[in-house]
């Protein structure tokens, strides 16, 4: 075992166990908790036994295990970016709607001439 493995296998294992504990305490959803548990556990296994990535890559017709890992990380980042972009847009729309409602309510309270233009 090299230094990288000695350091990061236990760290990934602790992160996987932490996800299970968070799941048990109800601090995360089942889907998210299991997903992150498997990500950390797979990371620990891949670091502890690197040839496993080559075996998995061959199943998918990819020559090198490092390429498989790179493809999976890239796809994961794209999904992550899309999810957060959607959340950002949803929040932006909610803030816009709230600001409109507050402006209309304030115009009504103060008897502003625009209060008749409510749609």
Image (cartoon, rainbow, N blue to C red):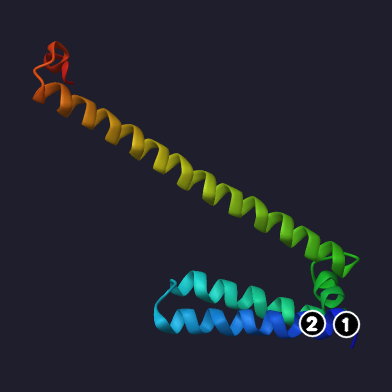
Q: Is residue 32 above or below residue 103?
A: below
Quarter holding residue 69:
bottom right
x, y percent for residue 97: 30, 33
x, y percent for residue 19: 54, 79
Q: Nearer the viewer, residue 101 or 30?
A: 101
Seen at 79% across and 78% down, the residue is: 46
Q: Residue furthest front?
A: 110
Q: How crowded is mark 1: few (under 14 residues within 10 Å), some or many (20 or more)?
A: few
Res 2 seen here: yes
Q: Nearer the viewer, residue 9 or 31?
A: 9
Proximity of marks 1 and 2: CB atoms separated by less than 8 Å: yes
Seen at 83% across and 70% down, the residue is: 57
Q: Which of 97 and 105 is in front in this view?
A: 105
Seen at 80% across and 79% down, the residue is: 47
Q: Residues within 10 Å of mark 2 (few under 14, many from 20)?
A: few
Quarter holding residue 52:
bottom right
Quarter holding residue 105:
top left
Label 1 sits on residue: 3
Q: Which type of secondary structure does the marked residue at label 2 adopt?
A: helix
From the viewer's perspective, is 45 left or right of 119?
right
x, y percent for residue 41: 67, 81
Classify the position of the C terminus by image quarter.
Answer: top left
From the viewer's perspective, is 106 left or right of 60?
left
Res 49 seen here: no
Label 2 sits on residue: 7
Q: How far apart are marks 1 and 2 (CA)?
A: 6 Å
Classify the position of the N terminus by image quarter.
Answer: bottom right
Q: Which type of secondary structure does the marked residue at label 1 adopt?
A: helix
Q: Residue furthest top?
A: 113
From the viewer's perspective, is 50 left or right of 40?
right
From the viewer's perspective, is 81 left or right of 107?
right
x, y percent for residue 86: 49, 45
């Amino acid at each position: 075992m090299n230094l990288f493995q000695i350091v990061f296998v236990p760290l990934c294992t602790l992160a996987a166990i932490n996800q299970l504990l968070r799941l048990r305490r109800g601090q995360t959803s089942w889907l998210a908790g299991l997903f992150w548990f498997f990500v950390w556990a797979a990371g620990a296994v891949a670091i502890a036994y690197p040839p496993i990535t080559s075996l998995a890559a061959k199943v998918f017709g990819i020559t090198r295990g490092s390429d498989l890992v790179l493809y999976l990380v890239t796809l994961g980042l794209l999904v992550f970016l899309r999810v957060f972009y959607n959340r950002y847009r949803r929040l932006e729309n909610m803030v816009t709607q709230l600001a409109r409602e507050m402006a209309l309510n304030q115009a009504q309270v103060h008897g502003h001439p625009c209060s008749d233009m409510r749609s």
